[in-house]
Amino acid sequence: MSSLSTVLPVGAQVTRTNVWSELRFGSTPRLHISISPNLTALAMIADALAGRRRGLPELWRRAISSRVGPAGHDAVRPLAAPGYSIAPDSLVPHSPVDGDISVPTQVSALHDIPPDALIKDLEETFGPGTPPAHWRSAAERPTRWLRGYASALADVWNTTEPLWQRARPLLDREIQRVGVTNVRGGPELLLGALSGRIMYGERGLLISDVEATTHELGDRKIVLVPMLAGKDAVIVSLDHPDAVWIAYPVPGADSLWRKPVAPAVDELTALVGPVRADLLCALDQPMTMSMLATDMKIAPSGLTYHCDRLRAGRLITRERRGREVWIARTHRAEELLELFRR
């Protein structure tokens, strides 16, 4: 019924405007935290696939874009419309307000949404009648859109889950930070420091946006959702009657984007050999065989040989997409590298 039932803001030119959305509190906000990786996947979809540049490194942007199929690319195009910062709730069918939500749970929920529910969602978001041009294809073929978006979400998560696993110490530290803030009674300082796009004003939060709006939050609790995303990524939802959730980049996330120095490389080399040790360390994100050969300055035939050995040890996976073969570290390899980092 109201455009407040939205996810916002992921607008394209937000940082180049002086437009702000204001979230007004009725009392001192009560802070909670949710560790829900689906918001990380949504932020990466907006940045890498829909072109909402929010600071995601180009290497990760290319890797994510290459791993998503045509149906997924088609489904996320509505998020790229300039001048719009709202989207239907169907992007996040399960809110993090009621607890931590996994990406597979979100993917399953998207498959379960009836086509009529998406049509109704679009009407509640944009009003009755024909939706904006960028959402018309979804309105005309809702089943296709839901399946395409679900496939994009799954593909993005398959690419970035290892990064999320490595971020666990940062997420644990953020849980502690929010807890201490609640105990000491200083939510204003924390809320005003979530992102460069968020300010704490006289009445509440100001969020840099493409559409100037004001929302009265009353006494609803604030659920903070730290995510791995570009430094300017912010997603807010106002539709829940008892809570508002705000997704923001977890502090320290920039350290994860950089290619790490090989951990205890001498010990790792002794275990798997120097070339394979370097290869595992180079796979900080999935890469094609050609990208990996260029990065490591090794002949394709030699690279194939070493990849065969690592695959036999269940340390990497290989997946053909079109003409390219993508290589990624397995969870077993991540555990091995983590062992040598200690």
Image: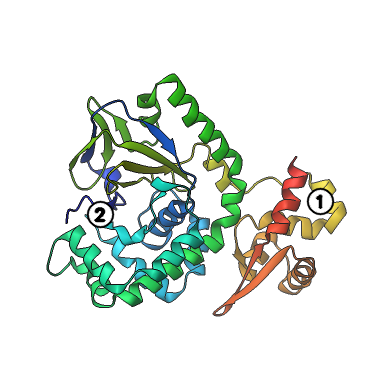
Viewer-side label of 1, 2: 2
Residue 53 visible in the snapshot = yes
Position of residue 84 measured from the top left corner of the image (x, y, whole percent):
23, 55
What color scheme is it?
Answer: rainbow
- Give me the residue at 77% from left, 71% from top: 302
The answer to whether residue 63 is left or right of residue 288 is left
x 27%, y 58%: residue: 87
Q: Is residue 107 left or right of residue 267?
A: left
Q: Which mark is residue 268?
A: 1
**Disc 1 versus disc 2: distance between alpha carbons?**
48 Å
Q: Residues within 10 Å of mark 2 (few under 14, many from 20)?
A: many
The residue lying toward the viewer, choosing from 8 and 73, is 8
Residue occupying image coordinates x 57% and y 56%: 161
Taking depth in this image into account, of 188 and 95 the one nearest to the observer is: 95
- SS under mark 1: helix
Q: Is the C terminus in the top left, top right, bottom left or bottom right quadrant?
A: top right
Residue 73 shows up from this direction: no
**N-terminal-most mark, 1 or 2:** 2
Identify which residue is drawn at 49% across, 36% down: 251
Image quarter for residue 113?
A: bottom left
Question: Where in the figure is residue 153, as x and y percent of width and height?
Answer: 45, 64
Amino acid type of disc 1? Leu
The residue wearing badge 2 is 86
Amino acid type, label 2: Ile
Residue 325 sits in which quadrant?
Answer: bottom right
Q: Is residue 222 above or below residue 124?
A: above
Residue 64, above or below 253: below
